[in-house]
Image (tube, rainbow, N blue to C red):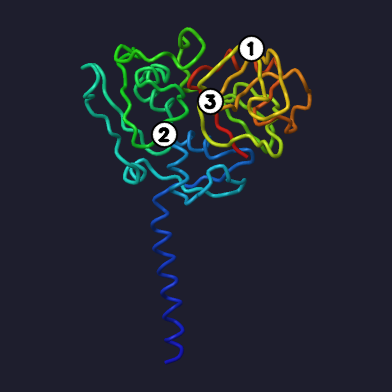
């Protein structure tokens, strides 16, 4: 009798493991390689970072490690776990426009890519001054063909017109652990450069952002933010979140070491290349 009582929990555990294994077998797996991050892995498998993180129970998408095994859901699985896309006829737009309901984790450049328009066109059509700041539940007017006839909102940048090309497949990866920036076209690295990010206590912000403001040259007055510096003619400045920017640096040469008040410092030559290659709406993925 005692032997049977001992066998019952063992059989239950074996049955549970069999069920879990059967469920997991429907998914493929991926082993994280050194230097990879969740954004790049998700892009490779046609997923969003949020989908992949949620499916693997990852609370902080910036924290994945080499050797970690990730479950990669098939398309049918992810579609049942995420909200359906809401694309409805616009009530306050012209007949050639639609609206889009922003879901959690979406960014303007991804939405623009989905509809084949520029993120600047969507920002103008909705009076958005900072394309990095949209929120879940927000209804966006999607202009037809990238036009902005439904809105008279001013452009959210000092440049006279949006760039003539789209940047949907271009994105920038900033690795704060390795102090390195890499520019990608899809999954292909096309440029890499050392950086200097923010040092304590002025750490560089992490997350996924988009470039929303650009200057070929700008005076940076740290005194208005409570910092003790003034830098004239900072070259090739590209803001991606509030006062955080990618820019050229002429006042130090310690690239590879955190040195800034939060911005991402580059050599002037590297910043110039990035400025000519990137544009409004280019995704900037910052992580450790």
Q: How many angstroms separate mark 3 from mark 2 (CA)?
A: 15 Å
Q: Residues within 10 Å of mark 1 (few under 14, many from 20)?
A: some
* For discs 1 and 2, the disc positioned in front in the rendered view: 1
Q: Is residue 17 left or right of residue 256?
A: left
Mark 1 to mark 2 CA distance (whole Å) = 31 Å
Q: Compare marks 1 and 2 and give the one earlier in the sequence.
A: 2
Q: Position of residue 283 (x, y in %)?
A: 51, 26
Q: Callout 3 environment at 10 Å: few (<14), some (14 to 19), or many (20+)?
A: many
Secondary element type, mark 2: loop
First in residue order: circle 1 vs circle 3: 3
Residue 17, how many percent across, how many down?
44, 65
N-terminal of the pair, mark 3 or mark 2, is: 2
Task: Give the Cα distance between marks 1 and 3.
Answer: 22 Å
Q: Which quadrant, please, contains the N terminus?
A: bottom left
* Left/right of residue 268 with respect to residue 152 in the rendered view: right
Q: Which residue is mark 2?
A: 106
Residue 144 at x, y percent in the picture: 30, 16
Q: Which residue is mark 3?
A: 171
Q: Nearer the viewer, mark 3 or mark 2?
A: 2
Q: Is residue 5 left or right of residue 86?
A: right
Q: Foreground residue, 100 or 244?
A: 244
Q: Is residue 3 above or below residue 260?
A: below
Q: Nearer the viewer, residue 237 or 55?
A: 237
Q: Which residue is mark 1?
A: 217
Q: How many numbered badges does the structure rendering display?
A: 3
């Amino acid at each position: 009798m005692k032997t049977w009582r001992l066998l019952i929990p063992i059989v239950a555990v074996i049955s549970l493991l069999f069920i879990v294994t059967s469920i997991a077998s429907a998914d493929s797996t991926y082993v994280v390689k050194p230097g990879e991050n969740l954004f790049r892995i998700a892009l490779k498998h046609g997923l969003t970072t949020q989908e992949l993180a949620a499916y693997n129970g990852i609370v902080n998408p910036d924290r994945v490690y080499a050797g970690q095994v990730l479950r990669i859901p098939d398309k049918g699985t992810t579609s049942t776990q995420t909200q359906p896309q809401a694309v409805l006829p616009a009530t306050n737009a012209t007949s050639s426009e639609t609206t889009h309901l922003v879901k959690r984790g979406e960014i303007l450049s991804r939405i623009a890519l989905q509809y084949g328009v520029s993120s600047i066109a969507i920002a103008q059509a909705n009076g958005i001054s900072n394309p990095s700041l949209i929120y879940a539940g927000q209804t966006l007017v999607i202009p037809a063909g990238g036009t902005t006839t439904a809105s008279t909102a001013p452009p959210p940048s000092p440049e006279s017109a949006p760039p003539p090309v789209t940047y949907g497949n271009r994105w920038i990866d900033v690795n704060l652990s390795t102090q390195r920036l890499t520019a990608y076209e899809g999954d292909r690295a096309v440029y890499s450069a050392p950086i200097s990010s923010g040092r304590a206590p002025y750490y560089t912000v992490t997350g996924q952002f988009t470039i929303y403001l650009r200057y070929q040259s700008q005076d940076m007055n740290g005194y208005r933010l409570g910092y003790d510096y003034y830098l004239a003619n900072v070259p090739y400045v590209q803001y991606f979140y509030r006062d955080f920017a990618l820019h050229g640096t002429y006042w130090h040469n310690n690239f590879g070491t955190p040195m800034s008040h939060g911005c991402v410092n580059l050599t002037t030559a590297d910043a110039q290349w990035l400025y000519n290659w990137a544009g409004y709406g280019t995704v900037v993925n910052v992580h450790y």
